């Protein structure tokens, strides 16, 4: 199976999982409702973020949709051009990033904002609420950077 197909399978699986979780959250919770899982540390909290990370560009939905579509097109073009040269780490990373970007893009199109639900309190700091798509983007980007800087053999 070609690398680009593997990337797209990872992407699709993550989109499905992300959207299923968000459907469960939306169907079973009220906006701003919180379910404490680990006291003073972790809860499920249903929020809708109309911005990007940390609510930057709040209520700029069209701009964020356009940005996401452009990003997807750029990554897609890279995958098409470089698919034979992509290693396993890059394959997983790109699949995670695309899955996350698509997951949040779907939310922006359907709900006019991203459904967030993972809430952590660390010491006395309430970390911004996030979702699986955000995790995929962050971890995928981190792995890609580490691979590019430290793991990839220099030719």
Image (tube, helix red, strand yellow):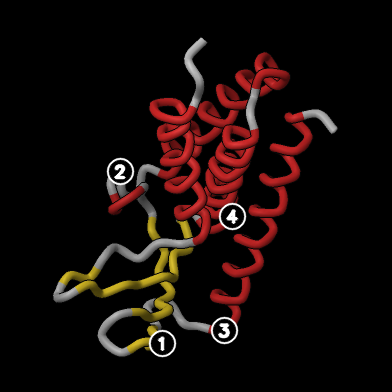
Residue plotted at (40% across, 83% down): 33
What crowding class fits label 3: few (fewer than 14 Cα within 10 Å), some (14-19), or many (20 or more)? few
Q: Which mark is residue 110?
A: 4
Q: Is residue 47 left or right of residue 74?
A: left
Q: Residue at x 55, y 46 (%)?
A: 105
Measure how far apart labels 1 and 4 are at the Cα level.
Answer: 28 Å
Q: Position of residue 65 (x, y in %)?
A: 50, 38
Q: Residue furthest top?
A: 155
* Mark sitting on residue 37: 1
Q: Is residue 51 left or right of residue 65?
A: left
* Residue matched to label 2: 57
- The image quadrant of residue 25 is bottom right
Residue 20 drawn at (x, y percent):
66, 67
Among numbered discs 1 and 4, the one appearing first in the sequence: 1
The x and y percentages for residue 30 are: 46, 82
Determine the residue positioned at 69% across, 58% down. Answer: 16
Q: Which mark is residue 28?
A: 3
């Amino acid at each position: 199976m070609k690398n680009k197909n593997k990337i797209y399978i990872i992407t699709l699986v993550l989109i499905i999982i992300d959207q299923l979780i968000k459907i469960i959250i939306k169907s079973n919770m009220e906006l701003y409702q919180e379910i404490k899982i680990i006291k003073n540390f972790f809860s499920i909290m249903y929020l809708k973020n109309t911005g990007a990370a940390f609510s930057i560009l709040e209520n700029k939905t069209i701009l964020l949709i356009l940005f996401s579509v452009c990003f997807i097109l750029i990554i897609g073009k890279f995958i098409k051009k470089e698919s034979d040269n992509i290693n396993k780490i890059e394959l997983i990373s790109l699949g995670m990033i695309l899955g996350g970007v698509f997951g949040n893009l779907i939310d922006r199109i359907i709900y006019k904002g991203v459904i967030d639900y993972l809430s952590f309190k660390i010491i006395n700091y309430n970390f911004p609420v996030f979702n699986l798509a955000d995790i995929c983007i962050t971890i995928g980007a981190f792995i890609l950077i580490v691979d590019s800087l430290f793991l990839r053999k220099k030719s």
